[in-house]
């Protein structure tokens, strides 16, 4: 009396249905991992930019004698320099050889580029300088002057995909008094 065990057709269909339901729930979660990782990185970058802005503003306020004569460059006690606007770090990654944010924050794998698309074969993140009109046209600020930058992931074009961190100093160059606090934000409305 050998009895052979096998699945019935109903049991096989039931297993297939259960697997289909599980995959329909699990696959979207795995697909969103990339956009979740980008958003987490952007949140970390924003926090680092805010900290750098606030810490270096405090340095300038505590020791205003370290500003140059036209209030555009601040020299730290260790000799490092960064550009300022209204006593806040200027909204440029690098400006005329002076590394403002490139030296104030340490981001791995961020490259300054002059185009609007971060190449797929380069760094994971790109940074691009932008003027006041770019920030006001997106309603991040209503300032009439200023300068800033955008950090965005590789493969993206920051003019076409709103998936980036931004920093904007709404102050004129050479302002010797405390200006308006720079805007630091994230636009993740089109990430992923």
Image (cartoon, rainbow, N blue to C red):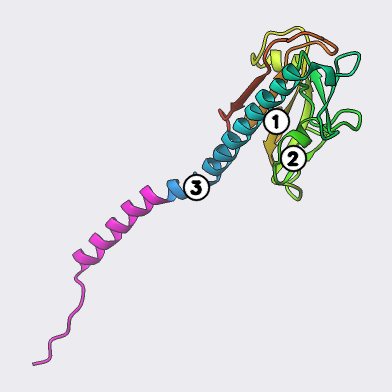
Q: Earlier in the sequence, mark 1 or mark 2?
A: 2
Q: Nearer the viewer, residue 60 or 139?
A: 60
Secondary structure at numbered mark 1: loop
- Where, quadrant-wise, is the N terminus in this rendering? bottom left
Q: Residues within 10 Å of mark 1 (few under 14, many from 20)?
A: many
Query: Mark 3 sits on what residue?
Result: 31
- Magenta highlight range: 1-26
**Quarter where residue 72 is shown:** top right
| Helix, strand or loop at mark 2 | loop
Q: Quadrant of residue 50?
A: top right
- Whether tag 1 and tag 2 are in contact, CB under 8 A, the answer is yes
Q: CA distance from mark 1 to mark 2?
A: 8 Å
In the rendered structure, are the residues bearing label 2 and label 3 in contact, judged by CB atoms less than 8 Å apart? no
Mark 3 residue crowding within 10 angstroms, few (<14) / some (14–19) / many (20+):
few
Which residue position is annotated with label 2?
Answer: 118
Q: Nearer the viewer, residue 113 or 86?
A: 86
Which image quarter holds the C terminus? top right
- Which of the two discs, 2 and 3, labels the residue nearer the N terminus? 3
Tell me residue 33's x, y (percent). 51, 46
Q: Is residue 163 above or below residue 7?
A: above
Q: Position of residue 90 (x, y in %)?
A: 78, 22
Query: Which numbered dot is residue 158?
Result: 1
Residue 118 or residue 64, whichever sits in front: 64
Q: Position of residue 125 (x, y in %)?
A: 70, 41
């Amino acid at each position: 009396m050998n009895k052979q065990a096998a699945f019935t057709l109903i049991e096989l269909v039931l297993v297939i249905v259960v697997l289909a339901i599980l995959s329909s729930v699990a696959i979207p979660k795995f697909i969103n991992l990339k956009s979740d990782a980008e958003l987490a990185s952007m949140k970390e970058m924003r926090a680092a930019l805010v900290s750098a802005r606030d810490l270096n503003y405090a340095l300038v306020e505590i020791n205003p004698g370290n500003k140059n004569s036209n209030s555009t460059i601040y020299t730290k006690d260790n000799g490092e320099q960064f550009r300022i606007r209204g006593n806040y770090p200027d909204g440029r990654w690098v400006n005329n050889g002076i590394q403002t944010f490139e030296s104030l924050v340490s981001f791995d794998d961020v490259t300054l580029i002059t185009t609007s698309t971060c190449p797929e074969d380069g760094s994971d993140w790109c940074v691009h300088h932008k003027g006041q009109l770019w920030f006001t046209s997106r309603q991040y600020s209503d300032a009439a002057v200023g300068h800033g930058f955008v950090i965005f992931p590789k493969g993206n074009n920051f003019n076409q995909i709103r998936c980036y961190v931004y920093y904007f100093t709404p102050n004129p160059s050479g302002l010797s008094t405390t200006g308006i606090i720079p805007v630091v934000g994230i636009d993740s409305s089109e990430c992923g």
